[in-house]
Image (cartoon, rainbow, N blue to C red):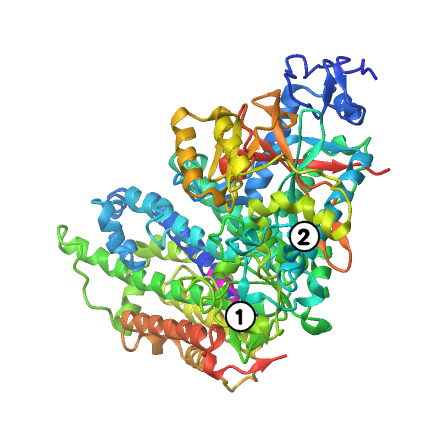
Amino acid sequence: MEAKTANRKRNHFRAYKLERFFDEVMAGRDKFRSHYRNLAERLASLSRQDLTERQQLADNSFRNQGVTFTVYSDEAGTEKIFPFDLLPRIIPVAEWRHIEQGLIQRITALNLFLHDIYHNQKILKDKVIPRTYVEQAKHFRREFMGFKVPKDIYVHICGIDLVRDETGRYLVLEDNARCPSGVSYLLGNRLILKRVFPGLFENYRVRPVEQYPSRLLELLRYVSPGGKLDPSVAVLTPGRYNSAYYEHSFLAREMGVEIVEGRDLVVRNDHVYMRTTQGLKMVDVLYRRIDDDFLDPTVFRKDSVLGVPGIVAAYRAGHVSLVNAIGTGVVDDKVMYYFVPRMIKYYLDQDPVLPNVPTYLANEKADLGYIMDHLPELVVKEVNEAGGNGMLIGPAATQEEVERFRRLIRSRPRDYIAQPTLNLSRHPCFIDGKLEGRHIDLRPYILYGDKVSIIPGGLTRVALKKGSLVVNSSQGGGSKDTWVLED
Amino acid sequence: MLSRVADSLFWLSRYLERAESVANLVSVNLQLVLDLPTEQGKHYSKDWSPIIAGLGEEEVFRESHRRYDARTVAESLVFDREMPNSVLGSLAAARENARTVREQITLEMWEQINRTYLWICSRQAHEQFERNDWEFFQRLMKSLQLFQGIVGMMMVRETGWEFLQMGKFLERADKVTRLLDEQFHLFREEKTVQENEADTHRWPEYLSWEEWHAEDRQRIDGSHHCWMAVLHCCHARAAYQRLYPSVVQPVKVTELLLLNERFPRSMLFSVSRVERALRRVNGSEDGRFTNRAEKYSGQLASELRFSSIADLFESGLHDKMDEFQIKINRIGEAIREDCIFPPLSAMAEVE
């Protein structure tokens, strides 16, 4: 279908370059995809000046509200706003249904897998996944073998990163089954866009997102110890110097529960209590945003000052529920990612709705040969790293970096995987007063309680640096509001 | 309420009050220079070290500044981040505390603190201060007053609110005593200046009650501006006019600021509010105490309630102000130890 109306007033897309990538908005030169047509018309009625003003208004709102994150490496300003791009990303309903189906399938398989490896280990006995990979995984918690978690749920909150290739196909890039962050930005983006650009919403029926905190609270209450009614819930944060502190406090406020630090909690007789001005108050469920390693200095890392001595004993005694459960980090291992399609087949007897990105395991002889032969074309990732750290992007790397990774991979093959360099899809972004294409991904947030609930859309992250493929906020990434349309 | 949260609310409120009183102090003194006769004004602008000393910031100040002239002192008391009691230092501390309890306060409260902080850090704020400090302080005051308005309008009157009241009024009581103490310095200094131009740092002993009265009568003209400034520092100009339809007399000003029960910036009013907030948190009855914080604040309030201004002058006002400051500190410590972080051994489980 042709869109002839774009240049009726102002054509912001005149100088827009499509290049060889899948563009979310344009199907070809001056051809808008149908679900973007209303948006394009609306944009055409606005001047560049209008857009600039609205962008500034949005930036100021974020700054005044203190919607910021902390960058550890940056000395100049440790607090930054997460850059926000005015143009929303739109996902048509049919596309979303497909994504939703894939996500439900994936988180179901992940939970079955975790339950299995911490109990009977059938999948290992049937040799579907080599036993050593699981047992050597850094975050596999052998000490929780046979431990029963409430309602058999391990991953309650999951962020599964999706990308689109040059044909527009959605692929799973990564699973985040420990403490995925970013949902507060998703909610903030919607709030601010509605405020600074209400007109954009006029001709669309966008599915709301603001129900997330109440869904989260329902989920936390659902997994209370022994099904205790009216449990006391709190968010456990590493503290205000943590990069995601804003999010922790935001979620606590929206849910109307306390936010606690390790030092606010004491354990007595295997029960967890908050220190209050009136005395000790019992806590039943903790949405903890602290990794396993730092949770309890008497069990995991001894040097942790963030944790609570004795909390793991209280957890074992079944007196406090931790969300997510201890031991989910094993599926964040990028080697486990490789096996998720097999888990889906094994536990659900289905083919994955959302395929993985082709992945090579450096620990497998055949794959290692391929990796070594094609290193400058590949993306190499360290299996336990996140946030774009410990990564080689072959085509963008210098000869020296490639050789450094070659040595690393050879010395520790279990720690690396490789993938082809993807041509991530692009979306127009408003940059220095002009529209330019930037690579994006999508992180939907999945809540797994008595049913699976997925916030419509997710956080669309944008690699704001020209040509960059890295969307992480710590590496110059920004975000967009993400719309899923009603039927 | 979580102990850590109570602590943050208490300090957030204390720091905001501190920011306001320091800003007021600087602003009023800058205006005072303009009101004094030229020679006196010039002399007064040369040395603001008593203001620095009154805030206990000599050490930090000396590290980075040589001169104690009005401009240097004023600017550092507003913008010097290294100085814990500067306006910026206090606002930064208030904001850090607010950040840790964001989920406990309303969005509007947080946003107002954050905006005020971001503004004072901006170049525009500094430029405005350079261009016209009066306008700068007006804007700052309005921002801080807006915060108090938001709190009053939106915050549920429960434990969190009470800790905000404790922090605010304890700080206010403390600042009133410091302001008066400093003013008594200044008051005597004029005499010294005339006697010995070179030696401005030599403070004579304090006057007796009789001498004060004599001074009052003789020197009303000379000290008028200074005592007017004290009133302005405490937003007490209108209250004074209403309660004492006479010229500004140091004794009356002191009485208003220490002993008036109904004026919200007086010491008695402030200490009574601290006491009341403590009682509400613990649900304890009037006339009794259940912990040291209630005991000390009750004692101090009673002392003020059952004193005349002449009584306070008996042992010398400077000593009296010192004594009050020690008592206020003791209340602060007791609040922390008994009400915010009660010892774990004494803790019972609550439902």
Which residue is disc 2 drawn over?
Answer: A110
* Nearer-the-camera pick, A313 or B234: A313
Residue A232 visible in the displayed image: yes
Identify the image quadrant of residue B72: top left
Which range of residues does the magenta coloring cover?
A: B5-11
Horizontally, is B122 left or right of A148 in the view? Answer: left
Where does the image place residue B258, in percent across and percent down from the top left? 41, 69
Of all chains, the one bearing label 1 is A
Q: CA distance from mark 1 to mark 2?
A: 25 Å
Which residue: 58% across, 49% down? A332
Residue A243 placement, left or right of B206:
right
**Are labels 1 and 2 assigned to the same chain?**
yes
Circle 2 SS class: helix
* Residue annotated with mark 1: A311
Q: Which is closer to the viewer, label 1 or label 2?
A: 2
Q: Quadrant of the N terminus of chain A?
A: top right
At 56% from the left and 79% from the top, the residue drawn is B282
